Image: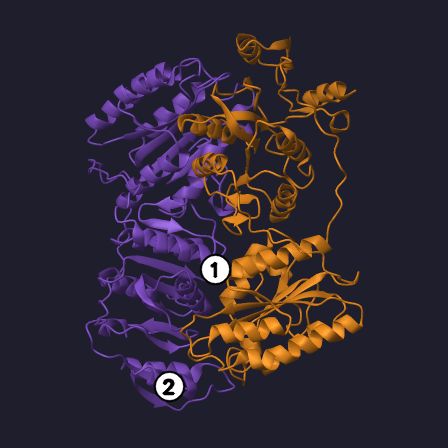
Chain colours: A purple, B orange
Amino acid sequence: AADKGLLVMGPDCGTAVIDGVGLGFANQSQSGSVGIVAASGTGLQALTVTIDNLGSGITNAIGTGGRDLNQQVGGITSRQALDVLNRDTNTKVIILTSKPISSRSAMELIQVLHALEKPVVVNFLGYAPPAYQIGNVFFASTLREAAKLAIELCDKLDLSTNMKSDSQKNFASSQRYIRGLFSGGTLAYETLLVLRAFTTGVYSNIPIDESYKLDDHASSHKHTIIDMGEDEFTIGRLHPMIDSDLRLRRFQQEAADPETAVILLDVVLGYGSHSNPAAELAPIISEAKSLARRSGRHLEVVVLVVGTVSDPQDVVAQTSILRKAGAHIETNADEAAIYVGNIISGLNTTSKASLRPVVLDSSGQSLAAINVGLESFYESLIRQGAEAIHVDWQPPAQGKDNLMDLLAKMKS
Amino acid sequence: AADKGLLVMGPDCGTAVIDGVGLGFANQSQSGSVGIVAASGTGLQALTVTIDNLGSGITNAIGTGGRDLNQQVGGITSRQALDVLNRDTNTKVIILTSKPISSRSAMELIQVLHALEKPVVVNFLGYAPPAYQIGNVFFASTLREAAKLAIELCDKLDLSTNMKSDSQKNFASSQRYIRGLFSGGTLAYETLLVLRAFTTGVYSNIPIDESYKLDDHASSHKHTIIDMGEDEFTIGRLHPMIDSDLRLRRFQQEAADPETAVILLDVVLGYGSHSNPAAELAPIISEAKSLARRSGRHLEVVVLVVGTVSDPQDVVAQTSILRKAGAHIETNADEAAIYVGNIISGLNTTSKASLRPVVLDSSGQSLAAINVGLESFYESLIRQGAEAIHVDWQPPAQGKDNLMDLLAKMKS
């Protein structure tokens, strides 16, 4: 059906509101500026109702069926529905909600959302948000919060996004990976969490998912984030915030790897830390960058500087030394991770088969629906002034095979 | 050491700022109104720095060691540190951050936080927040967001909390559990997610954690939330939003159980749904409540009503019928879950051994510290004008046994 520009909703999807007409289970609400895509029926209804109760309204609310976002189906209906709302001129903000999904599906969807022009509020049930905001994508923990946030965003015309443009760096085709060398464990872990929005499969000595544990902490594999403050790096030596020797050597090792596109380092200032880390780092950064340049590569070096103006090292001077050496400076782990996340997702685009756009004519043509099964749904459609055909059908005791046959016939 | 009113920081804890004096790795920052408790060293530093960079400052920042919050240690130092900041008159808002912790530890800590008088911003790395706000507890996804939110909360004097007081209902001693009977799957799941802040071990046919899967979907066990829209309940019958027969019988079954304290139901209105659900529910609710009363029990019935004023059922009339039958009405799943969460956590209080308060005299007495190991940490202390004793010590290659001996001697 996707090939024909039609939207298949279901199975296990009983809900939509298109141009103010409710299909299946649906609530009558004011019209407004929020569009909803929901892989969850009551999620869609609760959002519609809360938005209405808060004094706003919706454009279209599209249920995709709870199974659309699992890995086998790949979210085809959700992607079509998002595309519809992205092109719909009345929709200012989109809400995307779903039942629990895998972290891979979540990441792939977030990448789809980043390509849209509108703000999107995401509520994936039970998913730990990588951040409050990544570019045009906002994360809410509950349906009510998603509704509230979407309404707030409708009123904000100038949406400041935190997606920094890459200004098209000259990476070589071999360069694909991020290598993060951290002295601060929490900074490393927060980076891993935020990078979930951009890629799956970041290897680490402190991975979120144990299947991405590095085999050998001394050598990186694909995307790698290392916490060098962990015991395996500090036995018999001082913490990397004081003694940068091991980290500097690892930096050179990563810089020489033709697969490395970005190196991310933290520099934690303050009492107890090295008295002048920039003086040690800067020459090694500029040398690595010029070595890469001579081999036809662009090596991006991002330094996360954590320090106050009152710290003994003088954060302004430290930052300026690092910047002169060619480093890009960030001051918060989440922002640093978003910066490098954008680079690596640009270098690792997976081309999904493009979908034929669904035409949802909102300029007056009345809705036509084929209702299969429940007669009360058909009566609701007629009551709302929509054109509808009713097909009498009852769920068979043996399961969903007949429904699949019927859907197969509709596709032909 | 806890018995002596002393705070043990560590092992794996190298950070604190007490009365403006940094211990170990620490940043010099402005003084302000935010107190920090961190089971994460660089988490503490990054928070201090970001708060300073945003133009605010901290009172005390207490590192507890990354291992304090695992289940064996039980967060003793964190609880002491929270108590210190709760009593500290200069601290207006507290931030609690930690490396990844178990959901049980998270829940126990959130319960501790609910007993504090101040707003607390929580950032547990990788933990999916149950909501944005539960009572005085706020959830942030990243360190930067936690810092920003804490500063915003310092400026809000009248903190409106969403903890509704229980007004001391007359539950019998047998009554301990919530029973949730949902027609909407997403509403059921969001309830499960929010209840993580109040209790562990909610059984369900759609559990968050598979070890809490109900053995028999037809009978509840302890805290139970059921999605009656799942296949096992709908084979051969209509969806519970249309046909409430099975749910009404289950309601009576739960109401008769002397262990049931609260029954939570959703009523989803709109096209496609039952035309007058309140008329069916109300008599059964009032009958169940009076039956319970005659057995010396108070049966709390909470109905989550999802519907707009334009829906065909007339949400105002539906709500009023249910309220007259004695039901407490909520309109959002997260708020309903917080309401019942407060009731069940009141009925299931686990008494933790109370801890002797740590005295942190902030009225002028200068800080005295014993520094073991790194001489540079000692020099930093002296430089900041603190009183300090240095004990020369180097980490042994064979591990942490000597340190444990030393700590044991300090305790005596």
In this picture, is A36 found above or below B20?
Answer: below
- Give the residue drawn at x 68%, y 69%: B220
Q: Which residue: 26% across, 19% down?
A: A324
Q: Mark 2 points at which residue?
A: A378
Question: Going by the image, does A103 lie left or right of A80?
Answer: right
Secondary structure at badge 2 equals: helix
- Chain under numbered label 1: A
Give coordinates of residue A381: x percent, y percent: 35, 83
Kind of residue at badge 2: Tyr
Q: Name the residue under label 1.
A: A100
Q: Looking at the picture, does residue B53 appear above or below residue A177?
A: above
Q: Residue at x 53, y 52 (%)?
A: B130
Q: Which amino acid does label 1 sit on?
A: Pro
**Circle nearer the N terminus (1, 2):** 1
Instruction: Please state if A272 lies on the left or on the right of B257 as rendered.
Output: left
SS at badge 1: loop
**Dot 1 crowding, Cα within 10 Å, few <14, some 14–19, many 20+:** many
Q: Where is residue B217 in the image (x, y as percent from the top left)?
A: 64, 72
Count the numbered circles shown.
2
